[in-house]
Image: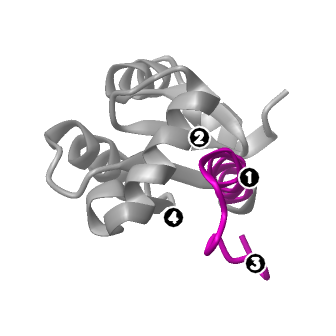
Amino acid sequence: MEGISPEGMDEQQLDMYWRGASVELINKHRVLVFGKSTCPYCIRVKDLFKKLGVEFFAYEFDQEGDDGLRMKKAMHQYTGKTSVPQVFIKGKHIGGCDDTMSAHDKGEIQKLLQNGCS
C-alpha cells in the first residue's frame, strides 16, 4: 500500500496490511488476475484476455518472493479460495479458470466490461 511499509509489523498487522494491499489492487485494476507465472490455468485466462484485447494486470505470486506468499494468503482470506488464478473484473470476483471461461462463454465477461458490476 502506498505510503505504508510493512517493516517492523507483527503477524496480525502484516495480515491486515496485505489484506488492504490486495483490496487496493482489486480496486485499482479494471481486470486483475492473481496467479503464478508458470500455471497453465493462469496462462489460459491471461491468453483469453489477450485474445479479447482486454488490458489486465497480472499479480504473479511466484515472482514476488515473500511478498507474493503474503499476498496469496490475503487473497485466500478475501476470496476463500487457495487455487489460482483468481480473477476480478471491476472489483467483482469472477473466480478461477473454469469460472472465467464459463463466464466468457455466457457473455458475462463482456457485459461486465461494458456495463460495470451491477
Separation (CA) of disc 1 from disc 2: 16 Å
Separation (CA) of disc 1 from disc 3: 11 Å
Nearer the N terminus, badge 4 or badge 1?
1
The prevailing secondary structure element of the residues shown in magenta is helix
In this view, the mark in front (3 or 2): 3
Tell me the SS state at disc 2: strand
Q: Specify the quadrant of the image occupied by residue 108.
A: top right
Do labels 3 and 2 touch, CB within 8 Å? no
Tell me the SS state at disc 3: loop
Graded by Cα atoms within 10 Å as few (under 14), some (14 to 19) or many (20 or more), the crowding at tag 4 reads few
Q: In the image, which residues are magenta?
A: 1-26
The residue that mark 2 highlights is 88
Nearer the N terminus, badge 1 or badge 2?
1
Q: Nearer the viewer, residue 89 or 25?
A: 25
Nearer the N terminus, badge 4 or badge 3?
3
Q: At x 47% / y 51%, what residue is drawn?
A: 70
